[in-house]
Amino acid sequence: MVRLDDNGDALIRVRDLDKTYRRGGQDVHVLRGLNLSVDEGEFVAFMGPSGSGKTTLLNLLGGLDLPTAGSITVAGDEITHLSGPKLAHWRARHVGFIFQMYNLLPVLTAFQNVELPLLLTRLSKAQRRRHVETALGLVGLKDRTDYYPRQLSGGQEQRVAIARAIVADPTFLLCDEPTGDLDRRSADEVLALLSGLASRYGKTVLMVTHDPRAAERAEVVLHLEKGALVEGTTSGPEGNGPTSKPAET
Amino acid sequence: MSPIPLIYNVRSVRARWRGNLVAVLGIAGVVAVFVAMLSMARGFQLTLVDSGSPSNAIVMRGGATTEMESVVTREQIQVIAGAPGVAHDEEGHPLVSGEVFVVAAFHHRASDSDALAPVRGVSEQALKVHRGVRIVSGRFLRPGLAELVAGKSASTMYSGFGLGDTPSFGGRTWRVVGIMDSGGSAFDSEVWADQPVLSQTYKRPEDLFSSVTVRLTSPAALGDFKRALASDPRLTVQADRETDYYAKQSRAVSTMIRVLGFLVASVMGIGAVFGAFNTMYSSVAARAREIATLRALGFGGASVVLSWMVEALFIALIGGLLGCIVVLPVNGLTTSTLNWQSFSQIAFAFRVTPDLLGKGLLFALVMGFVGGLLPALRAARMPVASALREL
């Protein structure tokens, strides 16, 4: 269950997280004393207005940026003090990223794009091939392995990106506006995939979105405002009420 | 460190070929000039080295570095002819050729001005000693006549030295009776005359020679031959293997060409490095999101540096190969220059050899490395989080 305080048994534990940027000679406090615990297999959506700190939080959870203060612990590993190379290694093992603009490498085929995270493992070429085919099969694009991104629709590109995110079986998925650039139908397909990954395969999914319809698919919706988590709701299959409270300070 | 797949770089270079063209052409131009200059130096060097035979020794006055400053008397030649290691012809005559070396001003066709040409006074023995030289048209000199045999390069380089022509120099008129070919060596740039006639023309005593070329029984006979000459009190001469002598002769000019080549290529190379630098920087800027994505997936900074360096080197290699292809047609092209040692013109051909092409490619890779390093480091240091959202 998602909690806005520190739960020692959670998969992801965030404690007193601060992030301050310096812009134009002034400190901008993007995140302020944020606490959060996410259990394994949960599908959590972060909503909030622009500048509320959603993407910053996602970057910190994904080890793409370092907090000014506080700690993030994932599966028992405290990541906030890892050096650059160790953090890269940690990302490869634990995080699957899904971006709004898909971020596929345009010169590589769908197969080669999905294979990229596996190049950071010790798998043999044959094993990699099997994993890539499985991942592409899971997103329904097994017949598009040799297609380049420009030959795919937006929805298909995002599904390839999802295949790339899950192919190395990461600890959790981070999705930054995964449906922001898609039409409704493609967005629904992508969201169905993400919720299926959480419900059927027990994958932990954290998603930033502006789209309330996308957020409805998540088990838990957390709202960020001025760098703090202010409220939460659980939608779930039955559309249950809130399960979490404002962050305790 | 896990490397980013090579196919990514190869396809990216292909996809951005217009942007990469500047770097490729810049590097190709530098490599072409660099290899051309080296092949010129190599051609000059080989032309002179080919003039010598390892079985020949050239004997000059002690301390003389060129035939121009050497004097050997007829008596000394007779002593030299009796030294051990000297080969003999079928009739038992020693294969020794006393030669007089002078320079004369001939009309140089290419520059349409007078140029100093080497003229060698030789005896009938000359062709037996200089085995690489053969008459390809006409005939050899007849003793006592004002006749000339022109080297094949000399006959085309200077006006009036074709077969049957009657050039004038040294105050008399000569007749070209033969054209000789020495397979591209320095003798091709020379004009040969009968030694007594040439000495008379230039008012030199007939018994004084510039040098003596000796055919040895074998290349190994040089040691005994030199020792015999050194221990004979009647002689104050020095003997060198002919190939060594000509190699020394070539050193000054070939070194000068090579240094000039390096200088020109270095200056051009700086421009090409900036071209590569600019291309790679643009590439990093244009592909910021791709780099950030690779970093997000877990590829480390070192992998990114390696990938971008591979790409810079790949672009440089294409430029280098193009430069080598461009320069290939100059192979065999003949030109001439002043040989500082003999103060006379020498014709030589550009020699584009595999090792020079290899040096050209290496130079291209060095340019690629230097031009690619900073952009590669920039790519690795790029802030991942912000670059991920760039369009």
Image (tube, grey):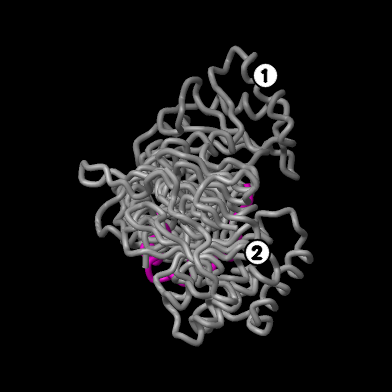
Quarter of image, res B162: bottom left
Q: Which residues are magenta?
A: B1-30
Residue A203's mark? 2
- Count of marks, rendered view: 2
Q: Is residue B263 left or right of residue B331?
A: left
Question: Residue B66: x percent and y percent?
Answer: 45, 31
Question: Residue B174: x percent and y percent?
Answer: 38, 55
Q: Residue at x 53, y 72 (%)?
A: A235
Q: Residue at x 50, y 60 (%)?
A: B293
Above or below, A233 relative to B68: below
The overriding secondary structure of the stretch rendered in magenta is helix
Q: Identify the element where label 2 is drawn.
A: loop
Q: Which residue is under mark 1? A: B227
For badge 2, the amino acid type reads Lys
Q: Residue at x 56, y 23 (%)?
A: B238
Question: Residue A96: x percent and y percent?
Answer: 59, 61
Q: Label 1 is found on which chain of the structure?
A: B
Q: Identify the element where label 1 is drawn.
A: helix
For badge 1, the amino acid type reads Arg
